[in-house]
Image (cartoon, rainbow, N blue to C red):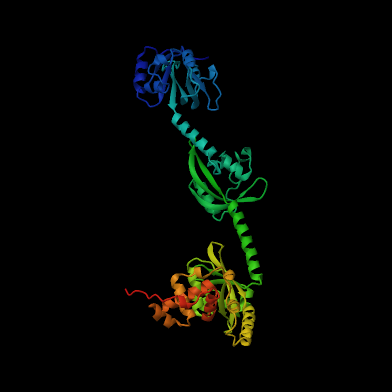
Amino acid sequence: MTQPLTSLRDTVALRHLRQIVAGLDEGVLLIDPDQSLLWANPAALAMHGVERLEDLGATVDDYRKRFKLRYRNNHRLSADDYPVERVAAGEAFSEVVVEVMAAGDDEPRWVHQVRSLVINEEDDGAPSCVVMVIQDVTAQFEAEDRFEQSFNANPAPAVICRLADRRFVKVNQGFLDMTGYAKDQVLCRTVYEIDVFHGAERIDLAKERLAEGRTIPQMEAELALPQGGTKLVIVAGQPIDMGNEPCMLFTFADLEPRRKAEAALRHSEERFTRTFEMAPVPMAIGARDGHLLCEVNASFCALTGFDSTEVVGRSLGDLGLWANDEVRTSIEALLDDDQPLRGVEARLGTKDRGEIDCIVSTEPITLGDGACLLWAFQDITQRKATEMELVEAIEAVMKDTSWFSRSIMDKLARLRAPSPDDHGVGISALTAREREVLAQICRGLDDKSIARALGVSGNTVRNHVARIYAKIGVNRRTAAAAWARARGFDGDSFAPTREKSA
């Protein structure tokens, strides 16, 4: 039979009990066997947002009217399920978590974790008072709610496993989107059933750290997909606590787009390499910095006579491929100014010490992570020889032709030098100093004489001459003079301007 309840109301024991529990951080609510509320400590009052016992209600029924309770899953508690009702009935229970709302509120203000305690009389063991012990866990659950919201909203794929049994207890939408799993396919399965470390290079370290509940460093892995196949990811683990249970948070970065991009780049470079090697046009690839060659094709080797092993790692200048220093200086100066070459005429020296007239062009390209320069050469030696033979034949026939018209002479000059339309430059493309140097060339002066006339050093004159050659697309003084006269420019209209002494 149930022991009859004996009230503690107005007893010395009650006063002593109140003195003992008054200063506790936990809330304590004493309930008389007749279901009236005897006393509440300040912590219990504060956990209900009131200052007096009367505000909690005189009885258990009053308490139910003033406060609405529901479980964390939003289900309302029936009258018999209220912790205060169960305490009053003498039921022993522990750690019931409920959300508490004051009457009239739509949303809970507090989260209480409640347990019961029955105080019996020493003589006959009959219950004389029942106690409801309350802990305010609002902050803890608010923090968990914030974590839950941020975890679910975070686009970075993530799952959480419980360390006790290695089972997944949470998964966010980012992980489901990345893998194609459904939520119920992940939850309650273990980290070995959905192997997050598959194919990882440091899988033994990962398993060791997981067993110890320690941080798992980032590592690449092949995450198995539900439809078959794998996805390349970076996975890392961070120990966390959830609901007082040790867990491991796994986060992922999807490397599949990078792998596809690398594969596409590799295929693109392979196609370029095949095209480069099979191209009938002599081509070379060099570094932008220093002009060192890193690759040449078969047509380049056939043109110059050099084997690829003799060329790679050296510059065109070091190989002696430029026929003279003026050509080398002018071309390297343009490249150093980040100016690509477009159809520049230059004479190359071959391995057997022959010379070839070429049109040279360059184009900046990127191979892998490196900035490179693509060189292309067009052999015009035969064309130049045919043109010069024609000019020489005409000049031989017309050797004594002072009566020859100026228009015919201009046409002969244009055969020796390209027209402005051929190279897209005219006299206006030259600087004032370069026009003065060209005027002296037209007068037949050599570099030393030009230096004395202009009051500059021989090196300065040579640099100007090299730049003139590069701009107008010639490589000889006679060709430069012919180019100038074909455009109505000669040295008679230019008086030399001497540099001022410092």
User: Which quarter of the rendering shows the C terminus?
Assistant: bottom left
x then y, percent, for residue 409: 59, 79
167 or 111, which lies in front? Answer: 111
- Looking at the image, residue 84 sits to the left or right of residue 223; the answer is left
**Visible residue check, residue 324:** yes
Q: 235 or 294: which is nearer to us?
A: 294
Q: Residue furthest left?
A: 502
- In depth, the one of 354 and 56 nearer the eye is 354
Answer yes or no: is residue 375 visible: no
Q: Is residue 392 above or below residue 163?
A: below
Q: Residue furthest right?
A: 227
Instruction: Tell me: 438 left or right of 355.
Output: left
Task: Identify which residue is drawn at 64% across, 81% down.
Answer: 386
Name which quarter of the figure residue 408 lies in: bottom right
Q: Residue at point 49% right, 72% down? A: 332
Q: Residue most toward the front? A: 403
When the figure is inspected, residue 34 is found, relative to residue 497, above or below; the finding is above
Residue 326: x, y in percent?
49, 78
Q: How many marks?
A: 0
Is 27 or 337 nearer to us in this picture?
Answer: 337
Q: Position of residue 287 (x, y in %)?
A: 52, 68
- Where is residue 243? Give x, y as percent: 49, 35
